[in-house]
Image (cartoon, helix red, strand yellow):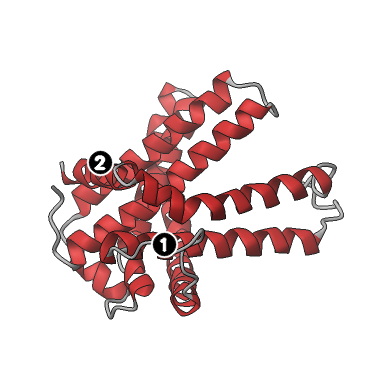
Amino acid sequence: MKGWQIFTHSVRQVFGNLDAALRISGPLYLVQMAVALFFGFNVFAGVDLTDPGAAIPWGPLLLVIAIVWTTSLWIAVAWHRFVLRVERPRSLLPDFNGERIMAYFGRSVIIALLLIPAALLMGVAASILSYAFMPFGVGVMGFAATILLLVPTIYMALRLSVSLPAAALGEAPGIGDGWRATMGQAADLLVLAAILLFAGSLLALPEKLLLPQGSVITMVWTALTGWVQMMVGASVLTTLYGHYIEGRALG
């Protein structure tokens, strides 16, 4: 049940410190949303980014990516430092710790480079294993393939990312230390991976099934659920680091 404990502890971390969570992330997240809406309506509205022949406005696209990445890393670093070192914002925005943000970005890139080949191999394995579900129909087989791919991939990402908060804090533990600290915890972390996948899917259901596409209420819901997933995701990593590296209880 530790996977469930880690998840609920992380959710409580956000909503039990909602004022701090909003102060740390709110203004920066609003910047993300404002930039996305501005360029979405004024630049990308008439561009089909899935069309290989489309004239993609690379300048604005790269600018949006840079702003979203910078603000997301800023939020993650500030949130880890708040939870683990009680470092509160001293102004409208949390401190911009450029050195820690760059360290966090660098470690994230390394983790991605390690995860991509592993995910490709797991994708092949998931495709093969999903054929066992063929008697139940193509839809069931596709669903099984998705679960067989995503749960192990999230599990791998969690283990590789345990040390990310160390980059935010300027502490010594690295990717290998996080991996070793979670050895023997496969069952708990697989459960956690499945819970995160299910929770994310549950939050997306209203947008897919109930809300009108392109409406204001849909955009608001997407923004709110995006914030929840971002903050809970950062808190999961904080909890993993605190529990497996620093030895904190999950109470």
Q: Tag 1: residue type?
A: Pro
Graded by Cα atoms within 10 Å as few (under 14), some (14 to 19) or many (20 or more), the crowding at tag 2 reads: some
Q: Can residue 78 be spotted in the picture? A: yes
Q: Can residue 161 be spotted in the picture? A: no
* x 51%, y 58%: residue: 92
* Residue 58: quadrant of the picture: bottom right
Q: Tag 2: residue type?
A: Thr
* Residue 103: quadrant of the picture: bottom left
- Quadrant where the image shows the N terminus: top left
- Left or right relative to 140: residue 29: right
The answer to which of 35 and 195 lies nearer the viewer is 35
Check residue 5 in the rendering and tell me which mark sits there, or answer none: none
* x 19%, y 63%: residue: 244
Residue 151 position, x and y percent, is: 36, 45
Residue 197 position, x and y percent, is: 39, 40
Element assignment for label 1: loop
Q: Which residue is mark 1?
A: 89
Element assignment for label 2: helix
Graded by Cα atoms within 10 Å as few (under 14), some (14 to 19) or many (20 or more), the crowding at tag 1 reads: some
- Left or right relative to 135: residue 69: right
Q: Is residue 116 above or below residue 201?
A: below
Q: Could you give the CA–CA distance between mark 1 and mark 2, rounded to whole angstroms?
A: 25 Å
Q: Which residue is mark 2?
A: 8
The answer to which of 108 and 63 lies nearer the viewer is 63
- Left or right relative to 4: residue 126: right
Residue 165 position, x and y percent, is: 34, 67
The answer to which of 176 and 248 lies nearer the viewer is 248
Query: How many discs appear?
Result: 2
